[in-house]
Amino acid sequence: MPKKPLILVTNDDGITAPGIRTLIRLMNEIGDVVVVAPDSPQSGMGHAITVNTTLYVKPERIDDGPQKEYSTSGTPADCVKLAKHEVLDRVPDLCVSGINHGSNSSINVIYSGTMSAAIEAGIEGIPAIGFSVCDYNWEADFKPSEPYITTIVKQVLENGLDPGIVLNVNVPRLPAEEIKGIKVCRQARANWVEEFDKRRNPQGKEYYWLTGKFVTFDEGQDTDEWAITNGYVSVVPIKYDMTAHQYIDQLNSWNLND
Amino acid sequence: MPKKPLILVTNDDGITAPGIRTLIRLMNEIGDVVVVAPDSPQSGMGHAITVNTTLYVKPERIDDGPQKEYSTSGTPADCVKLAKHEVLDRVPDLCVSGINHGSNSSINVIYSGTMSAAIEAGIEGIPAIGFSVCDYNWEADFKPSEPYITTIVKQVLENGLDPGIVLNVNVPRLPAEEIKGIKVCRQARANWVEEFDKRRNPQGKEYYWLTGKFVTFDEGQDTDEWAITNGYVSVVPIKYDMTAHQYIDQLNSWNLND
């Protein structure tokens, strides 16, 4: 019997979130699972790392599954670093992050703790996938996403991923029978139009809550937003080489050294 | 006389850091300056945004310059959102972030609060540049960087930047006479090799400090690391469309929908 793959599971909603509990259960069917996840929700943390405070790692026993689990006081990116360098004794075959409660499509990849963990794993040389279901509720129904997650994980284990590539997977909020399949996409051009909710505290001092609405301004039918809106699971290959290679020539035509 | 450009200045080291004070002074020579920056250091914050706590904005008067200044309780990305939507009454012509105390070359762009502010400005439709000097000291000498910053800012104001493009500028830690000029580069393949410093607190509980060393494994002479090591100011055009476009065909050859 071939050796089972070692799978690292993490997220940004915290180790007790229903999304990660679903992902752990699915991964237990495929490999040997080690969970290293934040002890509390870390949404909106982007690719934060903890350099100015100390980090704790605590063994956990949250359900009866065969996985090993640890919670940390760190961010999702910290969890991956701690897993690789302190918790695990060999490099995992795969890192999966999520299942996030809420979309990480389009520009959300930039703000996402879920994706930052997957990207950190990619940087550390571990094939990695971030999974999200487009439903922000704590009680989101993850059941329809399960067969797609299993398929994608098995395909990554079989095919591998080139160095520098990480997958961003988003599952629409739909009943199982309405999901049409998996679509490989590009990141849609879209952003958040902020609306700050301005209030006064009991001492009369003004403060703000960040709110906003998500606006897509991309008409393409090859984007993750189009796929999700049209009933597909989107898979976007992303890379952390952020260089705009095709813009280098243009900058070289400027008068930068006159 | 043509109208002076409106320049938004921010950073991640906090509004009183010597780096941002230098940048404000330089920008006052070029345009009308509004500063919206964190009230305390935010290094390693990545592209974090504040969604779970409230944000404060406070007018500041730190020196005798003509700029308007505000500190906020938010992250660098929050500062840009607050500036655009609450502080400024028109979209600025340029956003400059920094001068960061320490390198943001190569993979550091992912972890950098300085660059996250510039990227956020780009997302919001504002031409943006992040500036860093490769010296982590609070008392870093920013003088040698000054003419290069002025040149690059003037060139961006003159040429504009395509939508989706942000510049990442790093200045080597060298005396002025040893800097050879400006070089347009790609992001080097490099990463941090973590070393967690494991300790025990007075109660006997284990904790970690994140440390590590930066390792370049890219032999190219067209990278930011090469430029900095060889005495050049590096300019990398980056983009926040993280799609690995050339990898889409490969994923489409997988068995994702069987």
Image: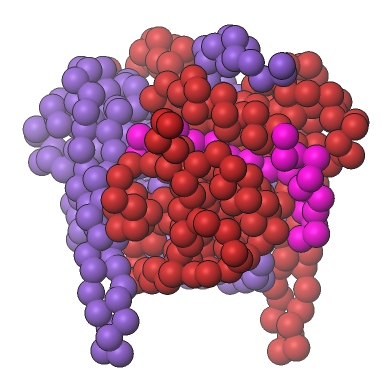
Chain colours: A purple, B red
Percent x, y of residue B234 = 71, 28
**B166 to B86, vertically: above or below:** above
| In the image, residue B177 above or below residue B208 | above
The boundaries of the magenta stretch are B121-147
Q: Is residue B226 above or below residue B85?
A: above
Q: Nearer the viewer, residue B10 or A74?
A: B10
At a point 34% along the width and 27% down the height, the residue shown is A187
* Residue at point 23%, 74% (across, down): A199
Residue B134 within the segment the image draws in magenta: yes
For the C terminus of chain A, the quadrant is top right
Quarter of the image holding residue B196? Answer: bottom right
Which residue is painted at 30% across and 90% down in the image? A203
Q: Taking the image as drawn, is residue B202 in sight?
A: yes
Q: Is residue A208 left or right of residue A112?
A: left
- Give x and y (percent) for residue B222: 73, 16
Left/right of residue B172 with respect to residue B31 in the rendered view: right
Depth check: give the residue in front, A248 or B4.
B4
Question: Residue B236: where, in percent of width, then height?
Answer: 62, 26
Whether residue A97 is visible to the viewer of this picture, yes or no, is: no
Furthest-front residue in this view: B1
Membership of B231 in magenta stretch:
no
Horizontally, residue B229 falls left or right of residue A190, namely: right
Instruction: Specify the quadrant that holds the N terminus of chain A.
Output: top right
Residue B138 placement (x, y as % from top left): 76, 60
Whether residue A111 sits left or right of residue B222 in the image: it is left
